[in-house]
Image (cartoon, grey):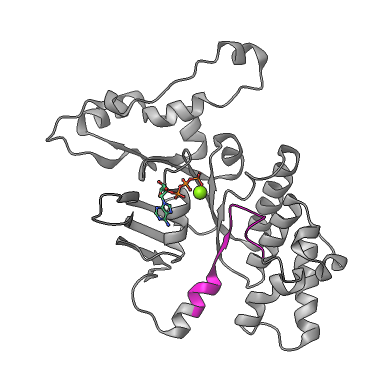
């Protein structure tokens, strides 16, 4: 993994809403991680912990309060020329959390999908434009006939496929998928995840895949980051995180997953996380530390020693 290319470097990212006011929310608070080219980086944590805000800040829907985001070594934030902005906008796309709210109800599917094609001038003729739309519909498992319909004529799963086709239309390299399946029926969730996995392999896409649910994220992710109240508390390769969760919050998230085996399900104990359990001294430095290669935990020096001993 060490020699893999870093596509994104997120360094000390901060997104404070209403900064300095009594109602300040530190939605993203000093978060650092890399995303390697071609990988699926999962991001999990309970509602309100800052997952969407992290995604939206990376893609520049929000100006960051602090920190930086490097894409292919170049700073994404800060002043940019129009051409540079356009190029970033094309490379990075987002699939939104709510398939019902994210498609313009007044536009036909063809025009929704072709919006990026038009903005970036990717089709030379009308025929070429429609050809691309038909191809994209096919790629996501829909068909030509769907092009002339409106969003309300589709189910949630189909709308999410349209959202994926729209994101793919500009031939991006990196896609932030913000809970792309959480609004869907369980039976449809696997279909959409499989489609995304297939596209990743075929086109070589890189994803930041956001989810509440650790069970689905395990299946799609190469590495997983766990967020708690605006902070990244643990990051590890997916298998390692499940086998050797170190931060007590990660342990509590894992203990919430029902087991498919009825016997172990009966004995499953749910752990609850109490942030006060760390019992930190005032002068202890709480940092994101690498316990074993590629396995990071937000912890004190004392916890770091304990985690290292546990990981031997
Ligand atoms: N535009 C905003 N203005 C003020 N506060 C906001 C804004 N957007 C989000 N927040 C707050 O920031 C925090 C993080 O929100 P965010 O939407 O990133 O969480 P999330 O992890 O995506 O949650 P969910 O799983 O419910 O989607 C929350 O406390 C939220 O209320
Ligand atoms: Mg969210």
Residue at x-position 70% and y-position 49%? 192
Count of numbered marks:
0
**4 or 73: nearer the eye?**
73
Q: Kindly identify the residue that appears in the image at 61 percent across and 16 percent down.
A: 265
Quadrant of the image occupied by residue 267 = top right
Q: Answer above or below: position of 254 versus 72.
A: above
From the top left corner, tell me how far across and down residue 296 is, in percent: 35, 40
Give x and y (percent) for residue 252. 44, 26
Q: Quadrant of the C terminus?
A: top left
**Residue 62 location in percent, x, y?**
41, 64
What residue is shown at x 62% (from left), y 60% (from top)? Answer: 102
Rendered position, 100 above or below 249: below
249 or 46: which is nearer to us? 46
Q: Is residue 155 magenta?
A: no
Give the left or right position of residue 176, taking residue 288 as reference. Answer: right
Q: What is the magenta range?
A: 86-103
């Amino acid at each position: 993994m060490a020699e893999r290319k870093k596509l994104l470097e997120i360094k000390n990212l901060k997104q404070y809403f209403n900064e300095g006011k009594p109602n300040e929310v530190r939605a993203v608070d000093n978060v650092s991680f890399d995303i390697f080219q071609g990988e699926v980086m999962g991001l999990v944590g309970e509602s309100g912990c800052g997952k969407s805000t992290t995604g939206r800040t990376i893609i520049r829907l929000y100006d960051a309060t602090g920190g930086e985001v490097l894409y292919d070594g170049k700073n994404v934030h800060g002043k940019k020329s129009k051409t540079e902005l356009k190029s970033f906008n094309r490379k990075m796309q987002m699939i939104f959390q709510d398939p019902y709210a994210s498609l313009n109800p007044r536009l036909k599917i063809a025009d929704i999908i072709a919006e990026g094609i038009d903005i970036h001038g990717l089709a030379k003729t009308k025929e070429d434009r429609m050809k691309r739309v038909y191809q994209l519909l096919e790629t996501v498992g829909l068909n030509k006939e769907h092009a002339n319909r409106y969003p309300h004529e589709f189910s949630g799963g189909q709308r999410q496929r349209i959202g994926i086709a729209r994101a793919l239309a500009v031939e991006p390299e990196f896609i932030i998928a913000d809970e792309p399946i959480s609004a869907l029926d369980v039976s449809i969730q696997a279909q959409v995840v499989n489609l995304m996995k297939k596209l990743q392999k075929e086109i070589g896409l890189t994803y930041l895949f956001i989810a509440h649910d650790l069970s689905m994220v395990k299946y799609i992710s190469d590495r997983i980051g766990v967020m708690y109240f605006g902070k990244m508390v643990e990051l590890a390769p997916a298998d390692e995180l499940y086998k050797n969760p170190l931060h007590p919050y990660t342990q509590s998230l894992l203990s919430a997953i029902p087991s498919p085996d009825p016997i172990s399900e009966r004995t499953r104990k749910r752990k609850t996380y109490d942030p006060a359990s760390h019992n930190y001294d005032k002068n202890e430095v709480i940092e994101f530390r690498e316990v074993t290669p590629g396995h990071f935990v937000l912890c004190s020096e004392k916890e770091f020693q304990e985690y290292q001993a546990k990981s031997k």
